[in-house]
Image (tube, rainbow, N blue to C red):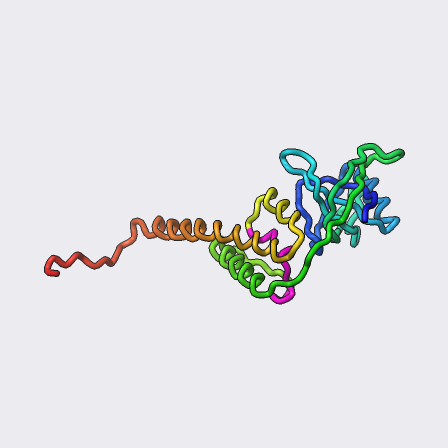
Amino acid sequence: MTNFIPIFPLGIVVYPGEQVNLHIFEPRYKQLITECYAEAKPFGIPVVLEKGLSEMGTLVTITGIAEVYEDGKMDIHTKGLQVFRTLELIRSIPDKLYSGAIVTYPNNGETRQPKLMQRVLDNIRELHRLLNIQKDFHKPDDALTSYDVAHHAGLSLEEEYELLGLFHEIHRLEYLKQHLSKVLPVMTGMEALKKRIQLNGHFKELKGFNFDK
């Protein structure tokens, strides 16, 4: 399936099911949001990386407008729907300030992997413990997917984008598992280093070497 969608390029990755709050202030995007909300139509958020506008993005729907300011700026609530791939960028649309794209929607395998998901989740919670961070995923563990936890695994924007381009749940979870397997040992080492530094200058109770052995 292919279709045309208005686009709002941003330097973020939005995953399907994710709720994102946006502050709208540019005239072209105030127009886009006003029209999409009035017509109950979704729009696309293609990811902007250092190299420029990326091929992949996420279709989102406006779930509500929190506030409209006197100058027309808006605070809105959105929710990710599905991942798209851009086939053609339409930079100029008659009578519109914003741009659009012709996109297609890759098939996305969402078969749950409960054992792998729990392993990834345990590692994320260990990472948060080392960082002294507390996160509430607002779902029971057995209802969580890779999309629910990906932003909490310490991925860079480029890595979040790579995960967006994986279209099977098992592949996304394996990606997170591999990432955490590299990050956790580093964080554990830093935690041990911090403890050694904190102990420096304290009175130490150490057992002396026994020359009689």
- Camera-nearest residue between 179 and 211: 179
Is residue 70 among what the camera can see? no
Give the image quarter of residue 143: bottom right
- Which residue is located at x 68 percent, y 59 percent? 110
Task: State the predominant SS element of the stretch in magenta.
Answer: helix
- Which residue is located at x 60 percent, y 42 percent? 158
- Which residue is located at x 14 percent, y 59 percent? 210
Q: Position of residue 182 (x, y in %)?
A: 48, 50
Instruction: Indicate the quadrant containing the C terminus: top left, top right, bottom left or bottom right.
Output: bottom left
Q: Which residues are magenta?
A: 139-153
Residue situated furthest left in the rendering: 212
Does 63 lie within the magenta span?
no
Q: Is residue 93 left or right of residue 52?
A: right
Q: How many marks?
A: 0
Position of 110 relative to 93 (above/below): below
Q: Position of residue 95 (x, y in %)?
A: 89, 34
- Camera-nearest residue between 132 and 211: 211
Q: Position of residue 188 (x, y in %)?
A: 42, 53
Is residue 197 among what the camera can see? yes
Q: Position of residue 162 (x, y in %)?
A: 62, 45
Position of 174 relative to 102 (above/below): below
- Camera-nearest residue between 153 and 88: 88
